[in-house]
Amino acid sequence: MPKVYIPHPKYPTVSITGSNCELKCDYCRALVLRTMVQIENPDRFLSFCKRLKERGGIGCLLSGGFNKEGKLPFEPYIEAIRYAKKELGLTLSIHPGILDKDDTAKLKDSGIDIAEFYVVLSESVLRKVMHTKLCKDDVLKALDTIYTHGPRYISPHITVGSDYGKISWEYEAIDVLRDYDPYVLIFLILVPIEGTPMAHVKPPPISDLIDLFSTARKKLENTELVLGCMRVRGRYTQTLENELIYRGLVDRIAVPYTSIPEPIIETCCSLPDSIAIKHAQR
């Protein structure tokens, strides 16, 4: 059976840009940021981390809105991250976006544990859906940079169906990741959100998702495949989970809809076993 990850409340996601995002991607329009803990400055982040520690929290995921270069503006938080690591002993992960070598070195020096990198290899998604100035080569270069110069743990993410529900470039992303032998690969599934241009787009057919997971299983033999928390709830995700479990195509599930035996690991699904398993509830 796959391992179960329930991040809330011990491993919350915080937006270090509050509700602000320069991209306004067609599938989000910054609405997802409203579901995160809103943080606008490093002092508030430190106060939040101290309260989290006092309540028995394990750590948190730093996320937020990206700028037009596809980067999370984390630089003002470097010292706060360092304090939360060294003084509070929290586990910290981050969605940094597209970084150059200097940015990546700063992130590693802060002591951050995991960098969660979105692998987007579609010019159409990068330009027309996400509204960035990036091309596919920029993403490939940033991927190599973060693996070469970044934190010890890198967890690649693929948002399946981000091209208005179609699956195509996701297979190329799997091929590219073979060179990096990731310990996990997290699949997120398009969720149609009211108030966005994709509100009425259907998520990819489950049969297509099974094919994608099957390909990843064959090509990434040493990688744990993860069904991340972003996916449509209800019958759709229940059927998907049951199919993936039955076929042995998933190793981790975040916030499962299907009843899965314990233990429950109260962290983000991206954490390596060396960090996460010690938090399992038995």
Image (cartoon, rainbow, N blue to C red):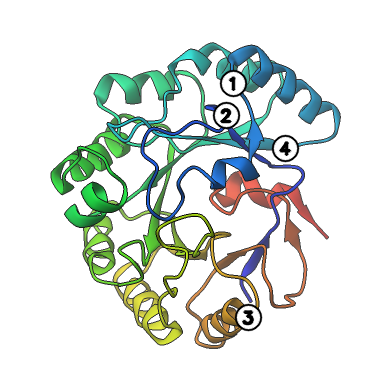
For the residues labelled 2 and 3, the Cα–Cα distance comes to 32 Å
Residue 238: assigned label:
3
| Residue 38: x %, y % from top left | 64, 31
Q: Considering only vertical position in the picture, is 237 above or below 138?
A: below
Q: Amino acid at mark 1?
A: Glu
- Crowding at dot 4, Cα within 10 Å, few <14 / some 14-19 / many 20+, comes out as many
Task: Tell me whether the residue at label 1 lies in contact with that at label 2, contact meaning CB atoms closer than 8 angstroms.
Answer: yes
For the residues labelled 1 and 4, the Cα–Cα distance comes to 21 Å
- The residue carrying mark 4 is 58
| Residue 257: x %, y % from top left | 69, 73
Seen in the image, is 153 located left or right of residue 93? left
Query: Is 111 in front, or is 244?
Result: 244
Q: First in sequence: mark 1 or mark 2?
A: 2
Q: Amino acid at mark 2?
A: Gly
- Crowding at dot 3, Cα within 10 Å, few <14 / some 14-19 / many 20+, comes out as some
- The residue carrying mark 1 is 40
Residue mark closest to the camera, 1 vs 4: 1
Q: Considering only vertical position in the picture, is 49 above or below 66?
A: above
- The residue carrying mark 2 is 18
Q: Considering only vertical position in the picture, is 250 above or below 68?
A: below
